[in-house]
Image: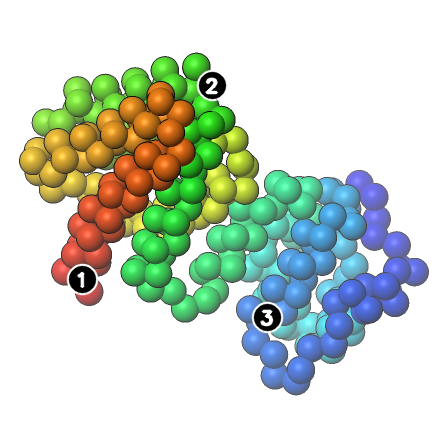
Amino acid sequence: MPAYPDDRSAEISASLGVLPSGTPVSEVARRLMDLFTSGSIQAGTRLPPERHLAASLGVGRSAVREALAALEILGIVDVRPGSGTYLRGTASELLPQTLRWGLLIGERHTTELLELRSGLEIYVARLAATRATASDLEIIARRVEDMRETVEDLSAFAKADLEFHHSLAEAAGNRVLIDQLHVVRSLLQVYADRAVHDEAEARVAIAEHDAVHVALVERDEDAAASAMAVHMATASARLTADASSAS
């Protein structure tokens, strides 16, 4: 594995910048992650020792140690006792973890996450209307059929529902959108696992998903976005109610 050269200390200091006294560990982690995902460091590179990072940031070694420990949990770095700390992936590979960290360390509310998810899903539907291949459309059609076939098994229905959205995102062909949706869905998973509460709600959801599929087949961007907006409004209202009852 390539070692991080010590003679780049000045460059690291300039790129990181000295943080204010009393900076929380979360901000130390943010600053380190900016460096690690900048694309200037190769995957597998051994990073500078904690004391060098601490000196560059103007913080204590304990803050750097805790920040690196948090980044290790998220899969950004690999801390090997007696060997050093290594960058685990390329900038693009680290993007999902970066997004997850940014959302997890900030104050968040279910309503705001639902608004973000709605906007992403609507745009995904719009993109998929022009980018979906014949194979993509077949897969999406199959997802709708899976939902119909599992309407009496709500657990299986929820999985089929999720697969529909996964397939739609793949058809949109934008990896960044897919990563963002993955993060938001994971944060909402406690509610999304209960996508619907009864067969009547499941049938409403099927009709809404089918409307999206029809718009995709017709290559109608506006109709696809509108159909997804309707579905997101219904789903968000249901999940908001779930969140309220759980709080």
Q: Which residue is mark 2?
A: 133
Q: Which mark is residue 5?
A: none
Q: Residue at x 28, y 37 (%)?
A: 227
For the residues bearing labels 1 and 3, Cβ distance under 8 angstroms? no
Q: Quadrant of residue 129?
A: top left
Residue 186, above or below 154: below
Residue situated in front as seen by the camera: 82 or 156: 156
Amino acid type for the residue under numbered disc 1: Ser
Earlier residue among tags 2 and 1: 2
Q: Nearer the viewer, mark 2 or mark 1?
A: 2
239 lies left or right of 226: left
* Residue under the point 57% across and 76% down: 24
Numbered disc in front, either 1 or 3: 1
Dot 3 amino acid type: Glu
Residue drawn at the location 31% of the way across and 40% of the way down: 226
Task: Give the secondary structure at mark 1.
Answer: helix
| Quadrant in which the C terminus appears | bottom left
On the image, numbered disc 1 is attached to which residue? 244
Q: Is residue 162 visible?
A: no
Considering every residue shown, the one lying at the far bottom of the view is 21
Q: Amino acid at mark 2?
A: Thr
Q: Secondary structure at mark 3?
A: helix
